[in-house]
Amino acid sequence: MENKILVTRSSMPPYEEYIEAIRPLWESRWLTNMGKYHQELEEKLKEYLDVPQLSLMVNGHLALEMAIQAFRFPEGAEVITTPFTFISSTHAIVRNHLKPVFCDVKPEDGTIDESKIEELITEHTVAIVPVHVYGNVCNVEAIQEIADKYDLKVIYDAAHAFGVKYKGKGIGNYGDASVFSFHATKVYNTIEGGAVAFSERRIYDRLYNLKNFGIRGEELVTEVGANAKMNEFAAIMGLCNLKRVEEVLKARQKKYDLYINKLEKVDGIRFFQRKKEAGNNYAYFPILVEGDYILDRNELYDKLKESGIFARKYFYPLTSDQACFKNQYRNVQLKTARKLSSQVLVLPLYEELNESEVIQICENIRR
Ligand SMILES: *Cc1c(COP(=O)(O)O)cnc(C)c1O
């Protein structure tokens, strides 16, 4: 087997830069608890993501759990969401003692099918949790219209959409809250980390309580909170990586464009469409392996693996089909989601991937 190509590889700053940047911590001994670097990163990310308010968290999953919790929905209420996502999206709903109602997605971009949301709304529905899957922007206008009509909250899982702009605005400006992940495998990382973007100031206070035990003073605890604070080492990694993020995106774009160029004429290989007014953060390169292709998705996955190319079946199975959720919630027709899930394959894409490796991957697919 030739050298292995994995689906992703974390972007990191130069070693010396990070080491220099963490040196002050040996003086201050302030390693966590909303320290200096936590504050600095929160401010800088607010600016970069172009959002009015931001709360940093220890990871994207807890950011999503707490974003949902901050709205204090009644136990057992229903939340309309997509099954074509990472398991975290559904876990965050269920761990809040809410019921996911899975809605089908659209074939062109894999995001929630807004035309099917309304028929799923009942008197128990309180929120919609859509996902900007692969950074593909949901139909935020139509979703907001439905939410306004039925008085629902919209909490976006924007874990894939770091830095994506839509109609000139940061993606985190849409809905009542948007959640980002800064996990090591994402386009921008703080090793582990995440954030909630929102506009209402009272959400900031609620999230602060939820991520810091509800502690409001030396002798005062006002709320039952957890611990989801980002530490200073992570915040410093975030500050270093933020300086390089444009460079990282450019490097990814090169490979992304090369993939399109080499694969667009291959019969049976289809790409997701992106909205015209939406930016791209080149976070993933998903392809759909359709009937005209000589192999099915699983066969292509296996063939690539034999050549040392480790693509991933993101997202298969649907979260609604996972053992922990199967047959437990309302049975909704998920025809498109199921089809995409059986056809999708995410190809390797990261800053340091060589163009020759992209060509090698594409040649394997064309063969
Ligand atoms: C990565 C991811 C999360 C969770 O983020 P972590 O930072 O890994 O906890 C949530 N939703 C989606 C869609 C993700 O891809």
Image (tube, grey):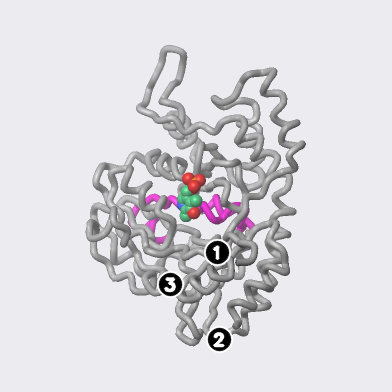
Q: Are marks 1 and 3 in contact (CB under 8 Å)?
A: no
- Depth check: give the residue in front, 58 or 353: 353
Per the image, the residue denoted by label 1 is 310
- Closest to the camera, between mark 2 and mark 3, is 2
Quarter of the image where the C terminus is located: bottom right
- Closest to the camera, between mark 2 and mark 1, is 1
- Residue 125 lies left or right of residue 66; in this view the side is left
Q: Position of residue 164 (x, y in %)?
A: 61, 57
Q: Earlier in the sequence, mark 2 or mark 3?
A: 2
Q: Is residue 281 visible?
A: yes
Per the image, label 1 sits on a secondary structure element best described as: loop
Q: Earlier in the sequence, mark 2 or mark 1?
A: 2
Q: Amino acid at mark 1?
A: Phe
* Residue found at x 63% / y 59%: 281
Mark sitting on residue 267: 2
The crowding category of the residue bearing disc 3, from other C-alpha atoms within 10 Å (few below 14, some 14 to 19, many at least 20), is many
Q: Position of residue 140 (x, y in %)?
A: 49, 61
- Depth check: give the residue in front, 156 or 287: 287
Magenta segment, which residues?
A: 145-173
Residue 205 against residue 271 in the figure, above or below:
above
